[in-house]
Amino acid sequence: MQFKVPQFIDIEDKIFGPFTFKQFIYLAGGGGICFVLYKALPIYIAIIAILPVAGLSLALTFYRYNNRPFIVVMESAFKHFFKNKMFLWKKRPEETRQSEPKTAETQKESTYTPEPTLTGSKLKELSWSLDILEMKKK
C-alpha cells in the first residue's frame, strides 16, 4: 500500500497576493500603527515615531537572517537578554578549599563515579534480540 507524503511542508501558503497570512498581518499592523501616529501627532514628531515602526514592520515581513524569520531572531534576543544566565562553574578561593578538613565520607563521595557495565550475558541477550528482530522483518 502506498501513501502520499506531503512535500514542502515548511513553505507557507500565499493567501493575500504574494504575502502569507503572517506577512500580511505584519504589514497591515505596521501600516495601521503608522496611520494612527500620522493622524495623532504633529508631522515632525510623527515621522520620528513612524520610521522605527515601519522599519520593524518591514523587517518582520521580509527580512530573513540565516534563512530564519526575523521574529525568531527577535524572540531569541529577548530570551537571551531577559532570562537568567546559568553559570556552570564557579571557582572557589584557594584558602576556603584548603581549610576544609576532608573526612573519609567526603573523600569517598568525591572519588566514587559509577560507570555502567555491560556483562557478557547482557551482550549476548542484546545480540540475540537484534537478530530475532531482523528475522521478523524479512
Image (spheres, helix red, strand yellow):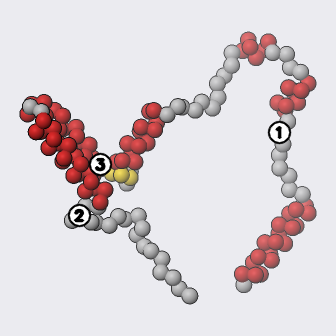
The amino acid type found where label 3 is placed reads: Leu
Mark 1 lies on residue = 113
Q: Is residue 58 visible?
A: no
Q: CA distance from mark 2 to mark 3?
A: 16 Å
Q: Callout 2: few (<14), some (14-19), or many (20+) C-alpha neighbours within 10 Å? A: few
Residue 4: which disc?
none
Indicate whether 2 appears above or below 53: below
Mark 3 lies on residue = 60
What's the residue at 18%, 38% (across, down)? 51
The amino acid type found where label 2 is placed reads: Phe
Labels 2 and 1: the sequence-earlier one: 2
- Name the quarter where the C terminus is drawn: bottom right
Q: Quadrant of residue 96?
A: top right
The amino acid type found where label 1 is placed reads: Thr
Q: CA distance from mark 2 to mark 1?
A: 61 Å
Mark 2 lies on residue = 16
- Residue situated furthest bottom in the rendering: 1
Between residue 132 and residue 51, name the one nearer to us: 51
